[in-house]
C-alpha cells in the first residue's frame, strides 16, 4: 500500500489523513505548491497567475468554473490533508513529500480527461453554459 494508507477494521485499504492539517483553515489565496511559508496573493486570480508562472499550474476549462475558491481549497486539502499528488494521486507520508514530488515531476497540475477526473471536480464546474447556442438558446 501507499505510505499514507492503512487497513481499516473491515480489512480494506483507506487513506489516512493528516489530522493536524485537517484542522487548519485553508487560504485559497496561498500557493498550494510551497510546503513552508507559501506565497500569499491578494486575490484568487493573482494566486492562479503566480502558480501558473512559477509551477505551470492552471485550472482546466476555467471558463466553466463556478466555484474557484472551492476548487482551490479542495486541491490544497487533497495535497495537505490527503497527502496526495494532484496529478497521479500517489500518496506520501507527508504533504511536504507530496509537494516535493509534484514540483520534481512537473505534477503541479490537475489530471483532466477521464470520466473519473471530471467526476472528482464536477461540483466546482457548471458546463451548462456550453449547451447554449449562439442565440442564447439551450440545445
Image (cartoon, rainbow, N blue to C red):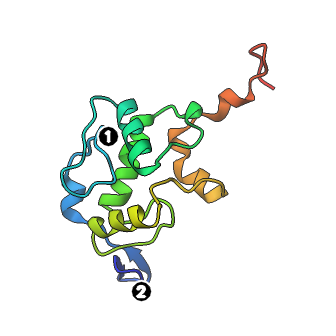
Q: Position of residue 93 (x, y in %)?
A: 29, 75
Check disc 2 and report the residue beneath it.
11
Residue 135: name its quadrant. Answer: top right
Q: Is residue 90 left or right of residue 137?
A: left
Instruction: State the SS at label 2.
Output: loop
Q: Which mark is residue 28?
A: 1
The furthest residue to the right: 139
Q: Is residue 67 left or right of residue 33?
A: right
Quarter that holds the C terminus: top right
Q: Is residue 95 left or right of residue 131?
A: left
Question: Is residue 15 depicted above or below 6 in this figure?
Answer: above
Of marks 1 and 2, the one in the foreground: 1
Q: Position of residue 25 (x, y in %)?
A: 22, 46
Name the N-terminal-most of marks 1 and 2. 2
Q: Residue at x 50, y 61 (%)?
A: 87
Can residue 42 be seen here? The reply is yes
Can residue 82 be seen here? The reply is no
Question: Is residue 45 depicted above or below 85 in this figure?
Answer: above
Q: Residue at x 41, y 51 (%)?
A: 55
Taking depth in this image into account, of 32 and 117 the one nearest to the observer is 32
Q: Residues within 10 Å of mark 1 (few under 14, many from 20)?
A: many
Instruction: State the SS at label 1.
Output: loop
Taking depth in this image into account, of 39 and 15 the one nearest to the observer is 39
Q: Residue at x 27, y 29 (%)?
A: 42
Q: Residue at x 42, y 85 (%)?
A: 1
Q: Position of residue 50 (x, y in %)?
A: 37, 39
Residue 17: name its quadrant. Answer: bottom left
Q: Residues within 10 Å of mark 2 (few under 14, many from 20)?
A: few
Q: Position of residue 126 (x, y in %)?
A: 59, 34
Amino acid at each position: 500500500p501507499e505510505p499514507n494508507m492503512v487497513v481499516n477494521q473491515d480489512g480494506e485499504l483507506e487513506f489516512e489523513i493528516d489530522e493536524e492539517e485537517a484542522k487548519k483553515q485553508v487560504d485559497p489565496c496561498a500557493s498550494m505548491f510551497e510546503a513552508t511559508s507559501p506565497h500569499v496573493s491578494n486575490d484568487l486570480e493573482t494566486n492562479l497567475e503566480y502558480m501558473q508562472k512559477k509551477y505551470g499550474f492552471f485550472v482546466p476549462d476555467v471558463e466553466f468554473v463556478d466555484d474557484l475558491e472551492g476548487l482551490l481549497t479542495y486541491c490544497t486539502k487533497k495535497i495537505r490533508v490527503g497527502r496526495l499528488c494532484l496529478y497521479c494521486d500517489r500518496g506520501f507520508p507527508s504533504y511536504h513529500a507530496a509537494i516535493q514530488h509534484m514540483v520534481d515531476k512537473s505534477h503541479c497540475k490537475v489530471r483532466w480527461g477521464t470520466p473519473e477526473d471530471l467526476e472528482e471536480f464536477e461540483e466546482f464546474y457548471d458546463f451548462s453554459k456550453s449547451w447554449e447556442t449562439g442565440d442564447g438558446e439551450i440545445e
